[in-house]
Amino acid sequence: MVHSAVLKSLLILAVCSFVLLPTGPGVLAQPNSVGAQAASGWEVVPIDATSTLYSLDMVSATDGWTGGTSGLALHYDGTSWTISSTRFSDAIYDIDMVNASLGFASTYQGNILRWDGSSWQIAADLANSLIPSISMLDANNGWAVGYQGGIYRFQNGTWHTVATLPYLFQTIEMVAPNDGWIMGRTGVILHWDGASWHQVGGPQNVWFRDVDMVSSSDGWAVTHEGLIYHFDGTSWSPVPSPVEGTFLWSVSMSSSTNGWAVGLGGTIIHYDGASWKKVESPVTDELHKVQALSDNDAWAVGKSGTVLHYTGSCDLKSSYLAASTRHCSDGDTVTYTIGVRNTGTVPASQVVVTDPLPANGSYVGSPTTTQGDIQSTNPLVVAVGDVAPAGEVTISFQLKAGSPGQACWFLSNQASISAAGEDPIVRQVVTSVGDCLQLHLPLIVR
C-alpha cells in the first residue's frame, strides 16, 4: 500500500522538478577597437616597434621570439619584449626554436638564420624568394619549404635542397622523423613517411596558410578563404568555420581540445574541443601568427607591431537560478535567487541580468542585489557591472503565485545573464502550483 501523502510528494517531484537550462558561453561576432583587454582574455602588449610581425615561437611561458620586417627580432624574457640587434634588412618570416640557446628562422629573401644563444647569424642562403615556413625536430634535424616549391632539409649542421617541385608551398609541420606535412596553394598536401614526400588527396582551389599537428592522428589547417580542415589520422576534412570568407593566417593547438586561429582584421577564433567560435579581439589590425602554450596562455602577433597575450577568459557557466520551493499553493510566496558566478581567469565585464516577470506572478517587496543597480522590475533588469575572477553576485526577489483559475498550473521563471563579448546564458526554474496530483493518475491509491 502506498501512502497518499508519499505518492503525492513523489508525483510532484516527478512533474515539477527544479530545472536548469544552460546555454553555454558564446562569442562576440565583431572585434572592437584597440584596448587594454577584450572580454575574451586577449590583451594588447605594448612593444617599442611598429614594424609588421610575421613570425612567433615561444620556447616556454617566459622565453620566446618574434620577428618581422627589416630584420626586426624581439625577445621575450617573461616580463617584456625587447629588440635584439640584427644586421639584416630582410623580413624574418618564420621562427622555430629548438631551445633557449638554439633556433632557426627563415626570411623573405630565402635565407635561413641561426640563433646561437647570443646573436642571429645567416646560416644558409637557400633560395631567391620567400621561405615561408620552417620546422625543427631537434638540434640536428629540421625542414623548411620555399614558396616556389623548394623543400630543404637540415642534417649534421648543414642545410641542403631536397627537391624543387611545381607547387607553391606555404607551411610545413614535422610531427616526428618519419611524419610530416607540407601544404600550400591550390590545395596541395604532401606527407613525409620517413623515406619520401608524396602527395595525398585534398581540396581543390584553396590556399592553405598554416598547419599545426597535435599528434600523428590529430591536426588542423587553415586557409586563405577562412576554411578550417581537420586531420583524423586518415584524411583531411573540412569542419564548420565561423569566419568563412575571412583570411586566416595561422593556427596553433595546445591540446586536442584547445586551440586558436587568427587572421585578417584582428580575427581570433577559438576551438574548445567541440567547435570553432569567433571571440572578441582587442585589435582590428591583421594578425599573422598565433601560438598556444596552454589552455590559459597564448600569444599572437601581426601588423603594425601588434602583440597580443591571452591569459584566460571569463566564465559564467556556473551561474544559476534557484527557487525556494518546487511546489506551492495559490497565494504562496516563492523566493528566487540568481547567482552570477565568474569561474574564469579574467573579469566578466558589463554583466547584465534580465528576468521577465512570470505569468501569474507578482512582486512581494523589492528585488535586491549585492552589486550593481536595479534598473527596472518588469522585466527585472540588473546592471551588475564587472564580476571579478572567483567573484559572485547574488540577486534576490520574491513573487506571489497568483491564481489563473486552474487546479494545477506552473510558475515558470527564466533569467538571462550576459556579459560584454559573450552570448547570454539562460537559466530556468519551474514551480508547480495547486493540486497537481489529480492530473497525473491513473496510478491507483488504495
Image (tube, helix red, strand yellow):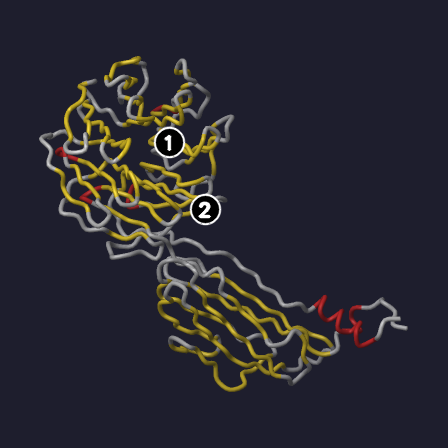
The residues bearing labels 1 and 2 have C-alpha atoms spaced at a distance of 18 Å
Q: Are marks 1 and 2 in contact (CB under 8 Å)?
A: no
Residue 42's disc is: none
Q: Is residue 319 left or right of residue 52?
A: right
What residue is at 33 percent from the left and 37 percent from the top? Answer: 250
* Three-letter amino acid code of the residue under disc 1: Val
List the residue tagged with mark 1.
Answer: 211
What residue is at 48 percent from the left and 66 percent from the top? Answer: 416
* Three-letter amino acid code of the residue under disc 2: Asp
User: Counting other residues with Cα less than 10 Å from the Cα at mark 1, is it few (<14), some (14-19), or many (20 or more)?
Assistant: many
Question: Eyeballing the image, is 104 above or below 72?
Answer: above
**Where is residue 20, by image quadrant?**
bottom right
The disc, 1 or 2, on the residue closer to the chain's N-terminal end is 1
Quarter holding the C terminus is bottom right
Which residue occupies the foreground of this view, 106 or 376?
106
Residue at far right of view: 446
**Where is residue 71, by image quadrant?**
top left
Which residue occupies the foreground of this view, 402 or 220?
220
Q: x, y percentage for residue 197? A: 39, 16
List the residue tagged with mark 2.
Answer: 272
